[in-house]
Image (spheres, rainbow, N blue to C red):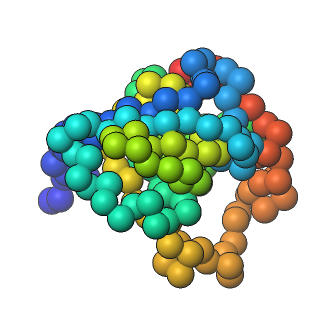
Amino acid sequence: MHDATGPAFTYTPIGTIHSPYTDIAGMPIQPVGARGVRGTIEIKSDLCGGLADLDGFSHIILLYALHRCTGYSLTVTPFLDPAPHGVFATRSPRRPNAIGLSVVRLVGIEGCVITIEDVDILDGTPLLDIKPYIPAFDSHPDTRCGWLTHVAENARDTRSDDRFR
């Protein structure tokens, strides 16, 4: 019989994300609601060599630890819908593995500091990885959005509250 939980993994942050958001309540819930909001990422000095050639990309994908979330729920009531949904059908931070993902605009790189825009991430968030956003790989215009089809446009103006602390 296969163990559904599998092996445990440990990740070491590669840096820290800084943003104007010091409290979960009131933050944008997606980058679309944070257009023009600037932040920075401080990469650990021994990993700065990995930033070579990243400045040729306009957008990057950030994978980060949702470090202020504890526990998880298999059913959550997301910000954009009053009805509960399975956690894997949402972008709720209250997940079995509290990992966040955001696509942000890359403004510049100076040494070990990356300046970004459209940041919807809590200040002090541990960064796990960076990947370049590549439209030919990452954009899928023929997608379906399930229950979000009629409410996704509300993400621009919706702000988080403390329901997922």
> Left or right: 57 with respect to 11?
right
Residue 62's place in the image compared with 34, above or below, is below
**Count of numbered circles on the image:** 0
Q: Is residue 17 visible?
A: yes
Q: Give the image location of residue 81, x and y in percent.
A: 77, 43
Q: 83 and 34: which one is in front? A: 34
For the point 34% across and 43% down, the residue is 111
For the point 77% across and 54% down, the residue is 152
For the point 17% across and 59% down, the residue is 2
> Left or right: 94 with respect to 2?
right
Query: For residue 9, which quarter of the picture?
Result: top left
For the point 67% across and 21% down, the residue is 25
Quarter of the image with the N terminus is bottom left
Q: Give the image location of residue 123, x and y in percent.
A: 51, 25
Q: Give the image location of residue 136, x and y in percent.
A: 53, 81
Query: For residue 165, which quarter of the picture?
Result: top right
Q: Give the image location of residue 32, x and y in percent.
A: 72, 49
> Left or right: 67 with respect to 45?
right
Query: For residue 45, which quarter of the picture?
Result: top left
